[in-house]
Amino acid sequence: MKSLNTILEQTREVFLHAQDAETLEKARVAHLGRKSELTELLRSLKDMTPEEKREIGPQIQHVKHELEVLFEHQKQALKEKAYDWEKERVDVTLPGKRQNIGHLHPITQVIREIEDIFISLGFDVADGPEIDTEFYTFDALNFPKNHPARDMQDAYWLNEKNEDGDPILPRTHTSSAQVRYMEQNIPPFRIVIPGKIFRHEPTDASHEHTFHQFEALVVGKDVHVGNFKYIAEEFFSTYFDKEINIRLRPSFFPFTEPSFEFDISCTVCLGKGCSVCKKTGWIEVGGAGMVNQNVFVSAGYERNTYQGFAWGFGIERLAMMKYKIDDIRLFHSGDLRFIRQF
């Protein structure tokens, strides 16, 4: 007992006089560690009689527990003493600092708005791969083998091929998803296909090599151009929140017959004529047409069984028209001053 009391008093004195955490830890190792005098006393219990163990063992454990509690208390006291409370002081009466919170990119916002409008018109949203094969990008859409759209000047061709040995490329239009969808679905259906596309062309204020497009496809037994015109007018009137008229002009696309370019009445002057529409009252938006029967055959449908229309437009172009943006390159510039406006 005399030895235990001595160990207790000496160790307590050392712990209480430690000036920093490092000194305190060294004291713990010396007085409570494996080579300490107290640990040696615990080891000596094995050589004692059962009566001695019952009497002395609890006393040793009591001293050890008391010193361990004292060590933790002193450790916490030194920690608080070393803490710079003034440096960490917070004045709760000061106004808070507003955190910067991110938000959706303007293109994403426009895509979601367009999807919502089409869904309200009874459409489903479909998708397709951004890297697609030559078959789905050109062959299935009735592009001739010598069509200029297949040239390196218009498309980015990859050196690799897919597992079937077919040439692959970043898609040049969302139309590449048309046949993919039709292969898996039986008409009637209405779908829209938003997505990113890639064109091999120089960039300027109105052209980009990477941009977004929206494809709409309606297929059934009795689909006609009048259906397209109605849906287009409903969509654009809702998107621009004003009455919009549609004008169709004859054109040519390999995957539609007949084909036409479609214009909308100027969103600025409402068709009266201004500098934006070059005094014509109309703004060109995209291409459309009745789906060529060869495309239906590529999808596995029997010729002349179904008919439908397809039309597409650039999403960046619609965003530029709605928000009066004069340079398409701003969308992908990464300039936060531009992004934060939306």
Image: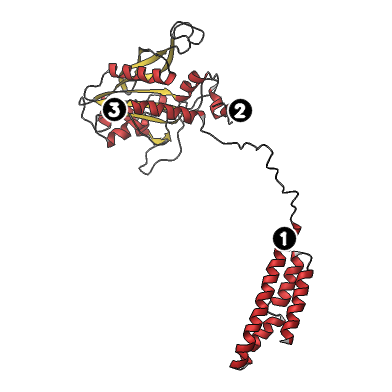
> In the rendered structure, which disc, 2 or 3, sits on the residue that comes first in sequence?
3
Tell me the residue at 71%/65% (across/down): 75
Q: Quadrant of the N terminus?
A: bottom right
Q: Secondary structure at mark 3?
A: helix
Residue drawn 39% across the image and 17% down it: 237
- Horizontal side of residue 187 vs 147, given as left or right: left
Q: Is residue 156 above or below residue 265?
A: below
Q: CA distance from mark 2 to mark 3?
A: 45 Å
Q: Amino acid at mark 1?
A: Lys
Residue bearing the label numbered 2 = 337
Amino acid found under the numbered disc labelled 3: Val
Q: Return the residue at label 3.
A: 295
Element assignment for label 2: helix
User: Tag 3: Cα neighbours inside 10 Å, few (<14), some, or many (≥20)?
Assistant: many
**Image x and y of residue 250, in percent:** 34, 13
**Residue 113 in sight from this viewpoint:** yes
Q: Position of residue 258 (x, y in %)?
A: 30, 17
Q: On the picture, is 76 further left or further right than 146?
A: right
| Numbered circle sitting on residue 279 | none
Residue 256 placement (x, y as % from top left): 31, 21
Residue 79: assigned label:
1
Q: Is residue 259 above or below residue 145?
A: above
Viewport quadrant of the C terminus: top right
Q: Answer with mark 1 or mark 2, whichever residue precedes in sequence.
A: 1
Q: Is residue 255 left or right of residue 72?
A: left
Q: How is the image coloured?
A: secondary structure
